[in-house]
Amino acid sequence: MKIARSLFCLTAGVLLASCAAHGQQPPREFLRTVPPELSGLPYWKAFRNHSSHSERFFRNLVFGRVFVHEHSAAPGIASAEFVRDDGRVFRCFRKNDNGKYALSWAKLDIETHSTGAARTITYQGQIYRYLLFYEPRLGKLRVESLVAHENPHKRKFETRLSGWVQDSWPRVLADACPDFATLSGMRINEKQTSPKIDELRRQDPDAPILNFPGSHLTAPGRTGLASSGVKPTTTANEVNAFLAAQEGNIVKWVSAGYTYVRNGDREEFWRKGGWNLPDKYYDVTRSADGKWLTIGEITYPMGYPFPYLPTGHRHPAFQLTDQFLARPFPRSLPHMGEAYADKRFVFHSEGKFSVVDRNGDLVEGPHFDGVWRWTKGHLEMTVRDDPAGPRSVGWRELVIDLDFEPTVWTQSTPDRID
């Protein structure tokens, strides 16, 4: 059976991954907790190792700076590379303990692939792709990849590079690769003289770039499955808190190029139309045991990297009600119909509103209280005891009726980092 949407493996999949990595079948009791269409997949297809941030974020962080790191082939030994604005990379690295450094040139691009931002290196005619992970608090930058193997069940995630980004060349590497240091035009950090990566960082703990602008725009669990050993990287509480915080915000499923709006009242996701596609609306559904979350085209296993990234931008519909709440004066709303033509509406928090007359005086009677909510792209308003029931209007029509000018997000809009 073909899988119609992107699927991932749930918590029991850790054991599935362990067994599959050795070419064995998982125990039968675990198969009962995994959808049948996942049970035969290699764990790296069942799990998705999403990069921590967007392509644009990593471009801003890496280009024009020095990436100081250790390589998995030479653990503990400091190497570095400088990325020019045109993507050309100067690489200064040491493969062993003999003290000799090698020089190389490469071409770097950062692209969006199926699981997010990929570091794409072209070196000696070969192309290599790796996922990127940035830890804001520590300033740590890691590069992970899926190691090739002829048996797909024996492939595994591995950390290839681990280090940090800074605005200078370490003295030890400037001496090892003097031409590169000169060509980069970067200043030299005289404090950093050790070839050992840990000592090099201790020599100037202020050199790594921490909390780079926009680093808060990440999602739960996107810290790297190589780092976690393919174990859970987040919790249900963190995921639920993230979803609550994104109410009314635009989030991206970058691998598919789709954008969504989180609407919490009915826990909906609105997929914004694009490329001549209509808007679509999905109810968020949860499995009885709380281990699965289905949103649109994605079935997500609670506890693993969350597939949607925030943009920091509000959807126009929610910009509108944000203004209603920030400036709670009486408003005429044509979509409420003739029955309320001479009435005005004042919006309150927690989805409530009151009805007033033309002078702004509260209309007497409990039946003139009401509730409002957004659902499927429409503002739905219900006046208590109104026999007509809920009255709704699409957000586009409402924006026009009220002559409101929202900020409209497009694919080319930069993430909001303030």
Image (cartoon, rainbow, N blue to C red):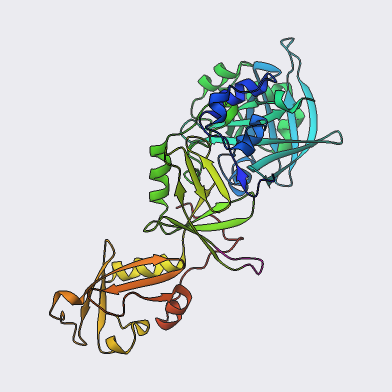
Residue furthest left as drawn: 364
The residue nearer to you, when weighing 31 against 23, is 31
Image-quadrant location for residue 179 = top right
Image location (x, y in percent) of residue 54: 59, 46
Residue 67 visible in the snapshot: yes
Q: Main secondary structure of the magenta part?
A: loop
Image location (x, y in percent) of residue 205: 49, 25
The residue nearer to you, when weighing 51 against 150, is 150
Image-quadrant location for residue 80 = top right
The residue that appears at 52% across and 28% down in the rendered structure is 12
Q: Where are the magenta residues, as a range? A: 272-277
The residue nearer to you, when weighing 368 against 326, is 368
Image location (x, y in percent) of residue 368: 20, 77
The residue that appears at 39% across and 81% down in the rendered structure is 402
Q: Is residue 275 located in the magenta-colored stretch of the structure?
A: yes
Left or right of 245? Residue 208 is right
Against 229, residue 383 (above or below) is below
The residue that appears at 62% across and 36% down in the rendered structure is 38
